[in-house]
Image (cartoon, grey):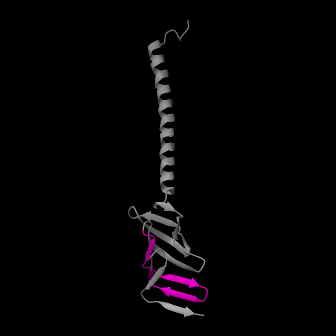
């Protein structure tokens, strides 16, 4: 006599369904864990800045001043805080500093951090500067050290 015929069919079907459901739960839980870890990794890689390596220019009738930085954050609609290796370059001079508030609509820039201005025969180290009148005028703040060649 066959012993498999004596085993309850309902019990076998229930057992097979139970094994399949455990297998599916394991597969889906692994997939959810993988997706969660991918999201966490991508969130860690996102910078806490609005603009990465921003580039702007101050335009006037006579010259252009090109502005670059490593990071930028929007303060409001017109103002942007530029951070890390902020550089202002034109054909006549360059200024380097760490933090600048740049106003796009008025085309002005204000810094209250250590700054170095370099031109052909002049070097100015200051505690900050203000570029206004569309780049035609620059005022240096704080303790300033001027070297004329």
Residue lying at 51% horizontally and 39% vertically, measured from the top left? 31
Magenta: main secondary structure equals: strand
Q: Residue furthest left?
A: 76
Q: Is residue 71 visible?
A: yes
Please, which residue is most extreme toward the front here?
Answer: 61
Foreground: 12 or 145? 145
Q: Is residue 121 magenta?
A: yes
Instruction: From the top left corner, tell me how far across and down residue 32 is, in percent.
Output: 48, 40
Q: For residue 113, which quarter of the picture?
A: bottom left
Q: Is residue 47 above or below residue 112?
A: above
Residue located at (46% from left, 25% from top): 18
The image position of residue 112, as x and y in percent, is 42, 79
Q: Which residues are magenta?
A: 106-129
Q: Whole-percent x and y of residue 37? A: 49, 48
Nearest the viewer among 20 and 62 is 62
Q: Which quadrant: the C terminus?
A: bottom right
Residue 8 visible in the picture: no
Residue for point 49% across, 30% down: 24
Above or below residue 124? Residue 10 is above
What residue is at 54 percent from the left and 75 percent from the top? 88
Measured as percent of width and height from the top left, residue 97 is found at: 50, 77
Looking at the rendered structure, the number of numbered marks drawn on it comes to 0
The image shows residue 83, relative to residue 39, as above or below, that is: below
Q: In the rendered structure, does residue 137 fall within the stretch colored magenta?
A: no
Q: Is residue 142 above or below residue 28?
A: below
Classify the position of the N terminus by image quarter: top right
Quarter of the figure with residue 120: bottom right
Along the viewing direction, whichever of 96 and 136 lies nearer the viewer: 136
């Amino acid at each position: 006599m066959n012993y498999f015929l004596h085993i309850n069919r309902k019990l076998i079907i229930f057992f097979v369904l139970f094994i399949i459901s455990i297998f599916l739960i394991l597969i889906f839980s692994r997939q959810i864990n993988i997706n969660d870890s991918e999201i966490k990794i991508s969130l860690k890689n996102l910078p806490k800045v609005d603009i990465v390596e921003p580039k702007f220019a101050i335009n006037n009738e006579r010259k252009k001043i090109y502005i670059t930085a490593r990071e930028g954050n929007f303060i409001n609609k017109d103002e942007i805080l530029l951070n890390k290796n902020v550089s202002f370059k034109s054909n006549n001079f360059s200024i380097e500093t760490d933090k600048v508030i740049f106003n796009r609509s008025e085309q002005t820039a204000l810094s209250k951090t250590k700054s170095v201005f370099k031109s052909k025969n002049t070097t100015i180290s200051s505690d900050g500067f203000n570029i206004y009148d569309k780049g035609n005028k620059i005022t240096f703040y704080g303790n300033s050290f001027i070297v004329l060649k």
